[in-house]
Amino acid sequence: DAKTTQPPSMDCAEGRAANLPCNHSTISGNEYVYWYRQIHSQGPQYIIHGLKNNETNEMASLIITEDRKSSTLILPHATLRDTAVYYCIVKGQGGSEKLVFGKGTKLTVNP
Amino acid sequence: EAQVTQNPRYLITVTGKKLTVTCSQNMNHEYMSWYRQDPGLGLRQIYYSMNVEVTDKGDVPEGYKVSRKEKRNFPLILESPSPNQTSLYFCASSNGRSNTEAFFGQGTRLTVV
């Protein structure tokens, strides 16, 4: 089972920031938080990941709370092409590298 | 360009007719895996491979086989497909070290009639 909880759906206006929350209250100290998205039925696409510090790349920012029990993915200026299902995944170091996908959040960016 | 390539993208077949879905990656990744995606069930791992000649079952391996004879290729084999294997399949690869991203293929939509 997925170790994360996400809202099933969210809406965002084009050009505005999209803030997608994720709860991972049982996360262990060596587990990372990963975000992927899936546009329509395409292959999932990596967005960002982090351990405890906030992270930013060209796609998004990841804010992880100090207790690491939740995080927020921020798309700073959402576009229509950001409409997708966003998955928050907790993954530890080593092991099978398996990604356990939950149901994710369906983000709809509206014009 | 770093990529994972699956073929075919779409396939309709009949029950019992053996088929192979190919997967190839150009990133020299050690770890490769197969997922299936079904409505209401999300993405589930079928098989994975941590390196050449090293494969293991994922969460839903029944009815599937894999092989890893070369590092770049990881074919998924359905010896006797059944309608319950109608699904959307994804191949993925990563370098097998923690703290790295996985790359996914574009998917293979399989229909077994």
Image (tube, grey):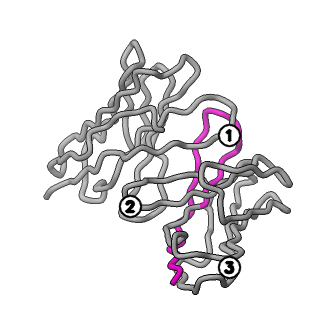
The lab-note entry on whether marks 3 and 1 share a chain reads: no
| Labels 3 and 2 positioned on one and the same chain | yes
Q: Is residue B103 magenta?
A: yes
Q: Is residue B14 above or below residue B76?
A: below
Instruction: Return the chain for callout 2.
Output: B
Q: Which residue is mark 2?
A: B39
Name which residue lies at 65% across and 82% down: B16
Identity, as a three-letter code, of the amino acid under mark 1: Ser
Q: Are marks 3 and 2 in contact (CB under 8 Å)?
A: no
Please indicate whether residue B50 sits to the left or right of residue B43 in the image.
Answer: right
To which residue does mark 3 refer? B19
SS label for mark 1: loop
Label 3 secondary element: strand
**Picture quadrant of residue A69:** top left
Are discs 1 and 2 less than 8 Å apart at CB?
Answer: no
Q: Magenta stretch?
A: B91-113
Which residue does the numbered mark 1 point to in the structure image?
A96
Whether label 3 touches label 1, CB < 8 Å: no
Task: Select label 1 or label 2 by which is in front.
Answer: 2
